[in-house]
Each structure stands twice: as structure tokens, then as C-alpha cells.
Amino acid sequence: METIFDLVRAGKMELPETPSLVVDGGIMRGNIARMQEGVSACGCALRPHIKTHKIPYFTNLQLQAGAQGITCAKVSEAEVMANGGAQDIFIAYPMVGAFRIKRALELQKRIRRLILAVDSLEGAQALNDAAQGQGLTCEVRLEVDTGAARTGALRDCCAALGAEVGKLGNLRLTGIYTFKSLVLEGAPTQNAEAAAREEVQMMDETAKALRAVGLDIKDVSVGSTPTGLLAAKTGLCTEVRPGTYIFNDWMVMKEGCAEFSQIAERIYCTVVSTPRPDLAIIDGGVKTFPMDAPIDAAPYYYPGYAVILDGQGQPQENLTLRRMSEEHGIVTAKNGETGLKVGQLVELVPVHVCPAVNLQNHIFLYERGELSSLAVAARGMLV
């Protein structure tokens, strides 16, 4: 079956505007089904992270496919997804700040299940006090640092911290969670299987330590797109939380967990200027392409801020996008000739799709022969 990308290349489908991020519905639905079937076959729950798409339409497709619930990073994202129908939401971010806690407690009153996160006694105490003031009991999970070195309690401290959290009368500690991704023995790795195995072993040991001090830890939640299915296969976790898998991108392809044919999105730009043979300017700059992936760095050596495709829709070696300003993408040619002309459409694959979606007010979705526009409803939801 022809994808939207095939149709655009063949001139059978015109895009209404550029820059634009376009998703092929067939590839996207295949990605949802493949992850859901794989995780379910392991007897594990899938709770996808909506950070990649930030759109209730896609959340509902994931839930209809069998996801237990969803994961959000911030309470403002969770509010958007609840408005779109989600009733089982985990906010995988420390619930710190009176403004954030207030909104979370209001959200808890209107959905079936809300799970909140803590990684410090100070944060847990503030959440407990606010919940007590409203006569609520909050389900919480303790975040564990398994090597990413961002939020999360150190593993050696988890049993003591968990015991203190367990004494708070308006919190119910039911699980632990972590984000580790491709880290092994504290350093980046390309060995996804070993990274996943280390992740679940660390979490299994932490859960056992918490249970040993009398806590009823039911949920052990782990996993990213590179490690999620591999972690589920170990049988040592109850839930995985991948996000990028719904669309995939150049990053996860290089990490070995997606084929090029499984990348469901493209960013299209128009050539607006060709001042020199070796230079072409497209109408997308840093306000279109995220710059969070370092180029020319080990282990994956990304060639630019997006990968430019050729006329057959395949990655090519000559053209690179390595310099941008706000609204200008500077395409250069290694051989001295870009071959691009003013007005020409350029097809690109984002290195990291999640922040790319968040830069768009809307994306275009191709399904059943129709191209429609979907608002990125949780765009900029940072609170």
C-alpha cells in the first residue's frame, strides 16, 4: 500500500503548507499494534508515554489497542489527555510545587485513576499535606535512579525513603518506576538487551528491599522505546512505558529498535533560496527542527539535525542540514552541488521526533486516503 510519502514524491498528493510534519496512519497503527502485541505476550502492561505525540487522538488509539493507561510528564499534559477521554494516567515526574499539586488533586477528582510520583520526603510530605486538606488519598510511585542521573532516589536510599513515605496517611505507595534507557553500568551503551536486563534487575532488587520493610509494592514500571519490550520479556517488571515507538525516528532506528520503513513521519520543507551551487535554504530552522541530539558524536554520529531523503525516499549522503537560524535551514552539499531548486519540496526525517512534534501547532495525518490536520493539543504544556 502506498504511503503518504510515496504519494507526495509521485506528485499525487499536495501538502497544504510547509514546514509541515506529516504522519502516515498505516505505519503509525502498525507501530502501535506491534508494541502492544509484543508487550501483552509477555504478560506485562503497556502504559505508553504521550510525550511523543501530545494528541488525544493517538492516545485513544493506544488505549483501544490494549494499553492499560498512559504516561505523562507534566500535570498540564495529563489535563489535556483527560479532556480527551483518558481515565488512567501516571504523571511520571516529581509532584513538587503547590501550583502543580493543586492541579493534580483537581484532576484526581475527575478521572478513574491518577498515579503521582515522588522521589523525596519533602515532596511526598507536601503532597500528603495538600491531599489531607482536601480529604483525598493519592496513589504514588517512588522514582528510582537506575543510571540516568536525573530525578529519582538513589537505590541505596529507597527502602528508608519508602518506609517514611509509607507512614504518610494520605499517600498510598503502590509501586516504583524508573527511566534508564540505553545506559549500562552507568555509561551509554548500544547493547539494548543488556541495558534492559540491568534495569529490571535493579528495580526487582529495589522492590524486594521495599517489601522487606513492609511496603506493598505491586507495580514495577520501567522501559523506554529501546528497552521496553526487552524489559517486558524478562518477567521482572509489571509495566513498560515507551513513547517514541508510535512514530519512531532516526534516533531509535540507529538504536536498533525500528526499521527505516517503520518511521511514520516526515518533515517537509520548501527551498526558498539557492544563493550558491553548494547551498540551499529551506523554510524550516530551529523553530522546526529540534537541536537536542548532538551531531558527529559517538556512538551514532548523527549527520545533521535531520536526515534529508533522496527522490526515492531513501537517505542520501550528499545533502546535510547542519546549520540553522530561527526560520532558515541551511542545506549544504558535500560534493559542491545541492541540485536543489527554488520552490522544490524537501523530505526529511527528524533525528528526534518528540521535540519536533512539540514545535508544531498541528500535524497532518494521512489515513484512508484523506489528509487531515490535528492540533497538537498538549504542545507547550510544561507545568
Image (cartoon, rainbow, N blue to C red):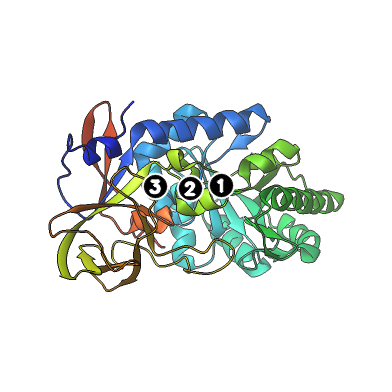
Which one is closest to the eye, mark 1 or mark 3? 1
Q: Name the residue under label 1.
A: 225
- The image position of residue 105, as x and y in percent, is 48, 53
18 horizontally vs 287: left or right? left
- The image position of residue 65, as x and y in percent, is 48, 28
**Residue depicted at x 37% and y 64%:** 290
* Three-letter amino acid code of the residue under disc 3: His
**Residue depicted at x 66% and y 34%:** 44
* Three-letter amino acid code of the residue under disc 1: Thr
Q: Distance between the residues labelled 1 and 3?
A: 14 Å
Q: Name the residue under label 2.
A: 244
Q: Is residue 14 above or below residue 383?
A: above
- The image position of residue 42, as x and y in percent, is 68, 31
The mark nearer the N terminus, 2 or 3, is 3
Q: Distance between the residues labelled 2 and 3?
A: 8 Å
Q: Mark 3 points at which residue?
A: 53
Q: Is residue 184 above or below residue 17?
A: below
> Around disc 3, counting alpha carbons within 10 Å, would you say few (fewer than 14), some (14 to 19), or many (20 or more)?
many
In-front residue for pair 383/17: 17
Q: Is mark 1 on a helix, strand or loop?
A: loop
Q: What element carries label 3?
A: loop
In-front residue for pair 186/210: 186
